[in-house]
Amino acid sequence: MLLRSDDINCDNKNLRKFLKITKDVPVLLAAEPRWLTKPETKSAVELVKQYKNATIVQHGYDHTNRAKDGEKKSEFPSSRSAEDYIPDIIEGKKILEELFGDQFYPVFVPPWNRFGHNYHILSELGFIGYENSKGFLDMQPERDFIDKKYFWNKLQTNRKRGLMFHHSWLNDEGFKFIEELIESGVIQWKSIRESS
Ligand SMILES: [Zn+2]
């Protein structure tokens, strides 16, 4: 399975902790390029680069909601024009390639898992894969809470490709859950490089 955490956009205690406890398994980090070029986020980039088990993929550009009133949140709603969003995606990809080199893998993960346009455009922009929430079990439908019973039940009945977390939303209990899950060895973790 894939172990994914979204919203790599700054250095914080939770990012450090997440990387530390997952250091022995492959992890997939969805990064927001717009925020990683700032001087104050340089340490986040340096930190992630120390963890070679982590693969970076592109999580939109700035994770800003551009949906119209009444639409579900999306950085790339269908109402947003190609002339407007394509340069952002290209720029974001360039940023992540420059910051992370080979650690970046050209897979696109849209914020809120929504992309209101034809996916083919992404392959034209150089992406070899696309991920949304479909193959993933969302481990935090509610912030700060992991329902272990629900998780084990889902794991047995519903074949998913991966588990999706938001490291910033993890509390001590959440971290402990991940730590124990890794230690238990019940899941065979895979890299996105082998899975797409
Ligand atoms: Zn996100």
Image (tube, rainbow, N blue to C red):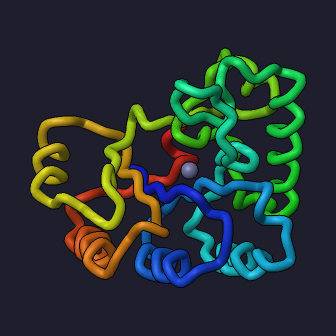
Q: Position of residue 15 (x, y in %)?
A: 54, 75
**Which residue occupies the foreground of this view, 173 or 94?**
173
The vertical placement of 39 against 129, above or below, is below
The vertical placement of 117 against 54, above or below, is above
Instruction: Work out which quarter of the rendered image holds the C terminus and state it.
Output: top right
Give me the residue at 76% from left, 55% from top.
33
Residue extending farthest to the front is: 69
Query: 98 left or right of 137?
Result: right
Query: 112 left or right of 55?
Result: left
Q: Position of residue 146 (x, y in %)?
A: 24, 62
Q: Quadrant of residue 124?
A: top right
Q: Position of residue 135 (x, y in %)?
A: 39, 35
Q: Position of residue 112 (x, y in %)?
A: 53, 40
Give me the residue at 48% from left, 69% from top.
168
**Which residue occupies the foreground of this view, 27 or 69?**
69
- All told, the count of numbered labels is 0
Q: Quadrant of residue 111?
A: top right
